[in-house]
Image (tube, rainbow, N blue to C red):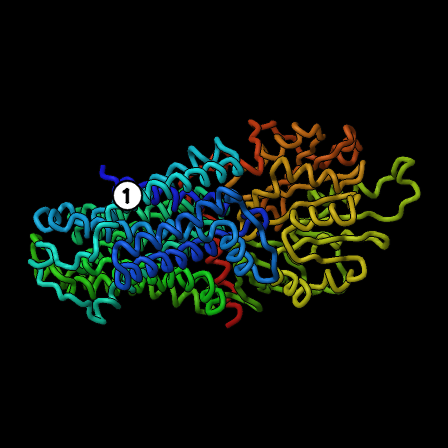
Amino acid sequence: MSRLHFTIFISAILLFSVQPMIAKSILPAYGGTAAVWTTCMMFFQIVLVLGYGYSHFLRRSLSPRTAFILHAVVLAIAAIGLLASPAAAKVIQGTDLTMSIIATLAISIGLPYFALSTTSSLVQAWHHTLNQTRVESEPSASAYRLYGLSNFGSLLALASYPFLVEPLIPIRTQMLWWSLAFIGFAAICLWAGSPTLGVNQWADSQSAEDSATSRKEKASLSSISIWFLLAFCPSVLLLATTNLMCQEIASVPFLWVLPLSLYLLSFMICFDRPRFYRRRFFGPLLFLSVIGSVFVVQAHIYVSIVLQVSGLASVCFFMAMVCHGELERWKPAPNQLTFFFLVVAIGGASGGVFVTLLAPVLFDGFLEFQLSLLLGISLMITSVWLAPTRLGSATSSNLFKYVYSASAVLIAAMVLASLMYQLSPEFRPNEIFRDRNEYGLVRVSETNGYRKFISGNVDHGGQLVEEIDSLSPSGYYGPSSGFGIAARRMREPKESNRADRQGSKIAVVGMGIGAMLAWCQPHDHFTFYEINPLVETIALEHFSYLHQFQNQATVKIGDGRVLLEQQLQQTGSGQFDIIAMDAFSSDAIPQHLLTIECFQLYLKHLAPDGIIVAHITNRFVDLAPVVYSAAQELKLTTCFRADSVAGGKHKTSWILLSRNADFDQADWMQKLKSDIEVPKLVRWTDDFASLGSVTRWSTRIDLENLQATRHTAEKQKATEK
């Protein structure tokens, strides 16, 4: 491996190892939402564009000697900055989540990341100039091969992070080692590029391969448009599939890394071994994966975690393979490579901007998923008819092109039908409110006098319309629920140190519609910590709990853990009698609210005889081992409660924790609490929280509930008619 190959390989490892590293370190500060990763991805893509633009400027405007000197200055400034202050998350809080994350990333790793992002295209330009004679006689030495090596390094970094780095090395140590590695990389890069100090002119001639295909010296507008769209489409689908997985399961490095690794794998295959891409093979696989992924999206909550992840990941990979395979066919001569990669980077970054900034404003659902599929299929049809023929490959027959295109049109029609169904009233029965922001999709629907709040695809409680002015505990928070048990426990005669106190102080992390206020008595006070401002809007405009108890309820917008930490520093312990943890977006797990460190924070805010109530109901993940592990380590008494709601159709699970060894010994409480076999404990900390060990792995499709839901919808539709 030459010095240039080694440099580009190391830069790729550093470039992509820092992505999940820095995202994980800032995740708790921004509420553990899926938007953290998508915003990080957008930032990385935009900086990559700046890096490619910088490389293109050096290639077109400066001599190799001058370009090397300027790049040496950039590397030196970045390395000195890290030497003085190693990379770390310097969190900036603001009113806008996206801009706050961007500002945090820019200050924390902006310049080093920019320096790394220039390496791929710049080193390829160095390679082409220093090895021009060899490239002309040996096509395998083409600079495009370095692009495949770069993606191999990126893939290696991503694949190793959730399995080797994250579980073994604390996040602060990770960032320190990364900073030291970058300083070493800067020295290696200068060593690798030093031969260009003796070169006065960049190589501009075409290789033998490029001459044989008679490619034009300057790319046409149509070619540039194709480059852009073939990069834009898989980028949109990458972030759309990641968004869907993280919204439903959890925003964790593994679910960030999996789609991105497959995306990079497609780049590596298509540019390092272009002959591995075959339309006759990958086209049909893409069609099958599109069918499977559309089914997963339509069936959503009735499909197991394995099918959801595999269905979405497979369509992400096969679409990336097709788009990047066709992109490789359209690539220009190496003398245009910096411009080509600049256009590709702009296309990828535009996809990130579209999903992160525009889609939440333009759509009230995750429609970018189907739109990216439609765009990809359209590009397949266009490319099969118009793409340049690769040197040495057979030309596709017209019969193949017609069959291929006809199949693509049929699949596109299915995707379009799915898209139209999501926009139709049948998909949104009795919906009275629907909106989306960076925290996800929220809805309100009303059926047979019952109004319910839905986050993502999960029912998060509701209210009978006839009880708007007369509230009683029901649903998830009825008398036999975990929260109901805790509230009733607080009503019992207290020991002497509470005899003179009136009412209870209750903190709730995750407000929903404020249904817990049904337990509110005259001298009680509830403090809700809610990260999504849309949820407060819904609670005020479509439900009555907050209105009826407005003098006894305070709503604080922001991440519950961050707000509790700030409160502890500013005003001291809240001395809450109950702290209820009920923060879920759709069914996603807010891991940072369940770590040992966070439970320690809860205890600092808890009254001596107070109770922590953890709502652990989840379709995909068994959180009991995590909560029991924290209870054991912090020497807390626990009480498990399983409850049924909606006529027994849904089960809820709660764990109550307290410092009091006998808090669960009341006779009436003994009758209500459930027994559970204490599971194998799983310890979550801020540095490490493994989702795999508590995941319910299955390939089950809940056809019974899926059919029942469709039957109910059809019955309701018939009643309305």
Vertical comparison of 519 with 164: above or below: below
- At label 1, the amino acid type is Ala
Q: Is residue 323 left or right of residue 490?
A: left
Which residue is disc 1 drawn over?
Answer: 192
Badge 1 element: helix
| Quarter of the image with the N terminus in it | top left
Residue at screen point 26% across, 40% down: 3
Res 527 seen here? yes
Residue at screen point 41% across, 57% down: 47
Vertical comparison of 662 with 29: above or below: above
Residue at screen point 40% across, 62% down: 368
Q: Nearer the viewer, residue 345 or 530?
A: 345
Measured from the top left, where is residue 309 in percent x and y?
A: 40, 46
Residue 17: image quadrant is: top left
Res 619 seen here? no
Q: Nearer the viewer, residue 582 or 596?
A: 596
**Circle 1 residues within 10 Å: few <14, some 14–19, many ≥20:** many
Residue at screen point 71% across, 58% down: 555
Q: Nearer the viewer, residue 687 or 332?
A: 332
Measured from the top left, where is residue 638 in percent x and y?
A: 69, 32
Measured from the top left, where is residue 619 in percent x and y?
A: 52, 44
